[in-house]
Amino acid sequence: MKLYYAPGACSLADHIALIESKLPFTTDKVDLKARTTAEGEDYTAVNPKGYVPALGLDAGGVLTENVAILGYIADRVGNLMPQGPLGRFRALEALAYISTELHKSFAPFFKPGSSDEAKSAAKTQLGKRFGLFEDALASQEFALGDQFGVADCYLFVMLFWAREKVGLDLPPNLSSYYERLSQRAAIQQALAEEGLGD
């Protein structure tokens, strides 16, 4: 498999999940402005959407979108989804929430020309939307219980953006969770490989 990524973009979630999975994979860094990869490919030929992530599959073809890629990785290894009859669906539920309610709320911070008012409103909205996980983490170690999974990979990236790019103060449970995850070997490795480590 080959992960197409941009440093610090949401593709970081897939990078973390792939390292955690111990599945063999390579990476190719994408220049999102030039739409080319470090290996010289026209990225729009890989992913016509033009953004990351994309996962080149060993059997051929490409998978895009975090929810799909993270689900695919978790299904391949079986230990990155919560257990139980609803485990997979709880993970998909959390991934969809992270993608649509958290990820999209960062848009004003990455869109050139966004007003200070739009950024302030986005910070308020993010604070409310992070509240779901703040409450859950009062009684559990990870996003969906006592096992690290793909939802944690994606949630970590949202918290990384909140802390490191936006300067959002995290409430106590999320702050402690972020610090714990920051010490996880797979996360440290992914950050280092993307040039984001200390």
Image (tube, grey):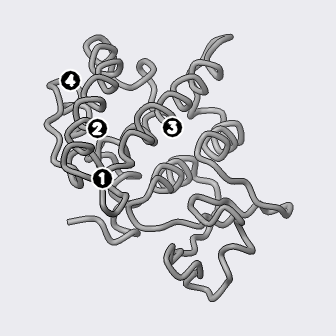
- Residue at the disc numbered 4: 173
21 lies above or below 127: below
Q: Quadrant of the N terminus?
A: bottom right
Q: Are marks 3 and 1 in contact (CB under 8 Å)?
A: no
Mark in the foreground, 3 or 1 = 1
Q: Which mark is nearer the camera, 3 or 4?
A: 3
Q: CA distance from mark 2 to mark 3?
A: 15 Å
Measuring 58% from the left and 18% from the top, which residue is drawn there? Answer: 90
Q: What numbered label is drawn on residue 75?
A: none
- Rendered position, 134 above or below 110: above
Q: Amino acid at mark 1?
A: Phe
Q: Could you say where residue 123 lies in the image, as x and y percent from the top left?
A: 23, 37
Kindly identify which numbered label has been placed on residue 122. Answer: 2
| Mark earlier in primary sequence (3, 1) | 3
Q: Report the side of 150 relative to 110 (left or right).
A: right
Query: How far across and how far down the image is residue 11, in percent?
Result: 50, 56
Q: Secondary structure at mark 2?
A: helix
Q: Are marks 4 and 2 in contact (CB under 8 Å)?
A: no
CB under 8 Å between callouts 1 and 2?
yes
Q: Nearer the viewer, residue 146 or 197?
A: 197
What mark, if any, has residue 109 been given in the picture?
Answer: 1
Cα distance in 3D space between marks 3 and 1 = 16 Å
The label nearer to you, 2 versus 3, is: 2
Q: Determine whether 109 is above or below 46 in the image.
A: above
Q: Reading the chain from its start, which is encountered first: label 2 or label 3?
A: 3
Q: Residue at x 41, y 67 (%)?
A: 7
User: Which secondary structure, mark 3?
Assistant: helix
